[in-house]
Amino acid sequence: MAYIQQHSAELPTPVRLGLIGSGWMGAFHGESIARRVPGAVLAAVADPNVDSAASVAAQLGTAKVTADAADILADPDIDAVIIASPARFHASLIAQAAAAGKHVFCEKPGAQSLEELDAALAAVETAGVHFQIGFNRRYAEDFQSAKKDLAAGIAGQPQLLRSLTRDPGTGSIPQAARVPAWTIFLETLIHDFDTLNWFNEGAEPVEVYAVADALVEPSLREQGFLDTAVVTIRYSNGAVAVAEANFSALYGYDIRGEVFGSKGMVQAGRATETAARRYTAEGLSADTPRLNVELFRQAYTDELADFAGAVRARRDGVPPSSGDFTITPGAADARRALAMALACIESVKRGAPVAVNETAAV
Ligand SMILES: NC(=O)c1ccc[n+]([C@@H]2O[C@H](COP(=O)([O-])OP(=O)(O)OC[C@H]3O[C@@H](n4cnc5c(N)ncnc54)[C@H](O)[C@@H]3O)[C@@H](O)[C@H]2O)c1
């Protein structure tokens, strides 16, 4: 008898996930669930662009396709949803999913204003469902090693922190004019804010000062497009952090984090795709990561495995396992990072530092 048949009685029932939004990130999450997350099944795909949903579903062997996320929310066979629609729909989808009793994984940002996010998170609280936000950097091996070291006090008292995002580019940004306003803060630097908050756990971000410009696409500056930003953040424990982003690194996708403290320094971030190096007459070279789905392939898988595991634990009444340090980013993390992004937007508008939580909406 095959192993799987012998042991099938012991295998837990898979967690059945519905994907809402099947664009760039949603399609990749769908693939991760269908191919790389043990014990999870991609049960349905919803996207108003139903051709996109159908194409993703066909590639992954998913039977249920719909243009309307409500069909997934009404399906009693679906345990939880993965929301990967554009950001402006996140808050209402979180609230609707929670009201329907579905556990929720949502891509960042959780919302575009704190009022919207608070309403969505209140629905999560009322329904008692599990909520996870898509801060995938926490699941990257090097970021987890750094966090473990920080939790063990290796860097001592944090004094300076740094996090950066340089998205891969060609020196110009295709369809830049269609990028929603303030994306650099709400959708890019929000990852850096979460890294800094996680690395500086226990401290609250107090004040931000953001400087931003269109240096890659200066012709779009007048219409408010921003592709480059630097943010200084003051924390309640006195630590000072810098977050920076640019949308067009010609050498690839570059993500780093660092904490400098009273006892030393801890760094995360992988500059090269593999450990291989080329030594030639021209010098030393190596391949660099080109795409988020290359650099963070494992991290994207592991964040969904964490989510599926938490959903399964709740469904089957198993207490969730706990480690040496916190990983799973939840409601408070989503809110803290969004509050920082919103304060940055206000800081750019005013050209001055802004207290975090002073601003509630864009
Ligand atoms: N964590 C990361 O590293 C990472 C990387 C890229 C994108 N993202 C996030 O993922 C989200 C989606 O980004 P993307 O790049 O995949 O965008 P995208 O435009 O490629 O895809 C969005 C998809 O959502 C669909 N959609 C529109 N309205 C919808 C609705 N009401 N319900 C369901 N689907 C709807 C669109 O038709 C489209 O197929 C954003 O929040 C973005 O910030 C995260």
Image (tube, rainbow, N blue to C red):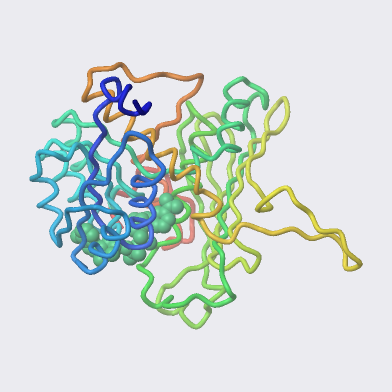
Instruction: Check the image and report above or below for 10 versus 251.
Output: above
Q: Can residue 52 be seen in this view?
A: yes
Residue in the image at 39% along x and 63% along y: 182
Look at the image and tell me in which quarter the N terminus lies. top left
Instruction: Check the image and report above or below for 233 versus 177.
Output: above
Dividing the picture into quadrants, the one containing residue 14 is top left
Look at the image and tell me in which quarter the C terminus lies. bottom left
Number of callouts: 0
Q: Is residue 186 visible?
A: no
Horizontally, is 113 left or right of 201 in the view?
left
Residue 153's spot in the image, x, y percent?
63, 21
Dividing the picture into quadrants, the one containing residue 81 is top left
Q: Please identify the residue farthest to the front as the structure is shown.
A: 1
Ligand 1 is found in the corner quadrant, namely bottom left
- Name the one closer to the observer, 282 or 63: 63
Dividing the picture into quadrants, the one containing residue 147 is top right
Residue 256's spot in the image, x, y percent?
61, 47
Horizontally, is 238 left or right of 61 in the view?
right
Residue in the image at 18% along x and 42% along y: 119
Q: Please identify the residue farthest to the right as the structure is shown.
A: 281
Residue 95's spot in the image, x, y percent?
16, 44
- Name the one closer to the observer, 257 or 33: 33
